[in-house]
Each structure stands twice: as C-alpha cells, then as structure tokens.
Image: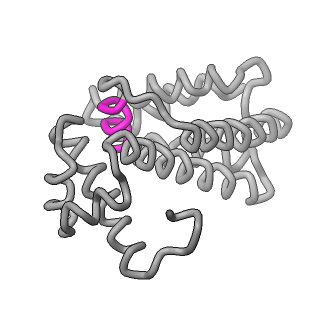
C-alpha cells in the first residue's frame, strides 16, 4: 500500500511513532512484546499498527531497514565531505557512540531468529557498498591501513562496542581499539 501512493502526513507521523515505539519496546522488553502493546506505546490504535505492519516480521524488517539506511546515509555524508581519510574515523566514532540502543535492538531481533526480508537485505547491500567506498578512500588517503577489509573493520567496531559497554570510559577504550586501523 505504501508503494502505491504517498502516505498522508498523519499516516507518516503514525508510522514513525510506531517504529520508534517498537524500537524502544524491543530494546527494553525483547521481541515478545505484542503489536497491541507497541500500538499503546506509540499512542495509536492497534488497527493503525496492523495497517502499517500486518505482522511482527514486517515490523522487524522495517526497523532493521531504517537502521541500515541511517547508517548508509551517515557513511554517504562522510564520503561526500571530499576527504574520506578525514571522515572515516569520525563516522566510526559516531557509529559506536550511538550504537548502544540500536545494537540492543539488532541483538534482540537476531536472537528471535528474525531473518531480514528483501528490503532490509537491499539496505544492507547499499550500506556495504557505500562503506566499502569510504574505506577504500580512507585507505587511498593513507588514513587507514591498506591490509584491512570491511569485515575487519566490522570486527573492530564490534570489539569497540563491547568495550564501551564494559568500561565506563568506553569512549577512550573505543579510540584505542580503533587505533589498530591506523597505519
């Protein structure tokens, strides 16, 4: 239905409220939270949630897609600044600083066995493409070691996220961990 015609302003607002409420609900209460409870938290009726997201799986996919698209847009902004070397580490630092709640949602969805649908898979592919260009540009500028690939960077970011959760001075330890990517 959304692809056929644009949503009215109130419908867009409701959809956004639903996504925000679902993200928070999954983070706090896990994936067992019902669509009706998400509707209550979003301040909309259950029918509104079910109209936008007939199944919880569709809601998962929407949350994952939004998250991946946000990351892609941020990577694209870092790429578009004209100096990938200067944009690479601030992008990763911002990603790590803001990832706490988003990572909780991702972990909750993965634990529930929610496999991303085709739209979320395409969003992931788009993110990989933009991030690969950002990494390649940072390597060409000499800001990042030439012997690392995107999977290496992902593992380093995961390590920095784990350190941030473990240590109160997580930003400091995350900087130390990201330092391994520098030449």
Residue furthest to the bottom in view is 9
Q: How many marks?
A: 0
Question: Which residue is at the front of the view, 101 or 173?
Answer: 101
Magenta stretch encompasses residue 127: no
Q: Main secondary structure of the magenta part?
A: helix
Quarter assignment of residue 32: top left
Q: Is residue 120 above or below residue 153?
A: below
Q: What residue lies at 15% left-to-right and 40% top-to-bottom?
A: 29
Residue 102: x, y in percent?
37, 43
Question: Which residue is at the front of the view, 161 or 176?
Answer: 161
6 relative position to 127: left or right: left
Magenta stretch encompasses residue 103: yes
Residue 175: x, y in percent?
49, 34
Question: Which residue is at the front of the view, 181 or 3?
Answer: 3
Q: Is residue 135 above or below residue 166?
A: below
Q: Is residue 164 above or below residue 7?
A: above
In which quadrant is the C terminus drawn?
A: top right
Quarter assignment of residue 6: bottom right
Residue furthest to the right in view is 140
Quarter assignment of residue 109: top left
Residue 92: x, y in percent?
55, 41
1 relative position to 152: left or right: left
Q: What residue lies at 34% left-to-right and 51% top-to-bottom?
A: 54
Q: What residue lies at 74% left-to-right and 59% top-to-bottom?
A: 81
- Residues drawn in magenta: 102-109
Q: What residue lies at 51% left-to-right and 36% top-to-bottom?
A: 117
Residue 3: x, y in percent?
58, 63
104 relative position to 58: left or right: left
Q: What colouring style does the render use?
A: one colour
């Amino acid at each position: 239905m959304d692809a056929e015609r644009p949503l009215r302003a109130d419908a867009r607002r409701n959809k956004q409220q639903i996504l925000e409420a679902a993200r928070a609900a999954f983070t706090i209460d896990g994936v067992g939270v019902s669509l009706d409870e998400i509707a209550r938290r979003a301040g909309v009726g259950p029918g509104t949630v079910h109209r936008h997201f007939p199944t919880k799986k569709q809601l998962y996919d929407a949350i994952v897609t939004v998250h991946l698209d946000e990351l892609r847009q941020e990577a694209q902004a870092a790429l578009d600044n004209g100096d990938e070397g200067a944009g690479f580490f601030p992008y990763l630092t911002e990603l790590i600083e803001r990832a706490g709640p988003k990572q909780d949602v991702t972990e909750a969805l993965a634990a529930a066995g929610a496999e991303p649908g085709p739209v979320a898979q395409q969003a992931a592919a788009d993110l990989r493409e933009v991030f690969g260009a950002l990494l390649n540009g940072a390597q060409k500028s000499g800001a990042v070691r030439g012997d690392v690939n995107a999977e290496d960077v992902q593992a380093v970011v995961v390590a920095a996220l784990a350190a941030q959760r473990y240590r109160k001075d997580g930003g400091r330890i995350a900087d130390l961990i990201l330092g391994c990517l520098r030449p």
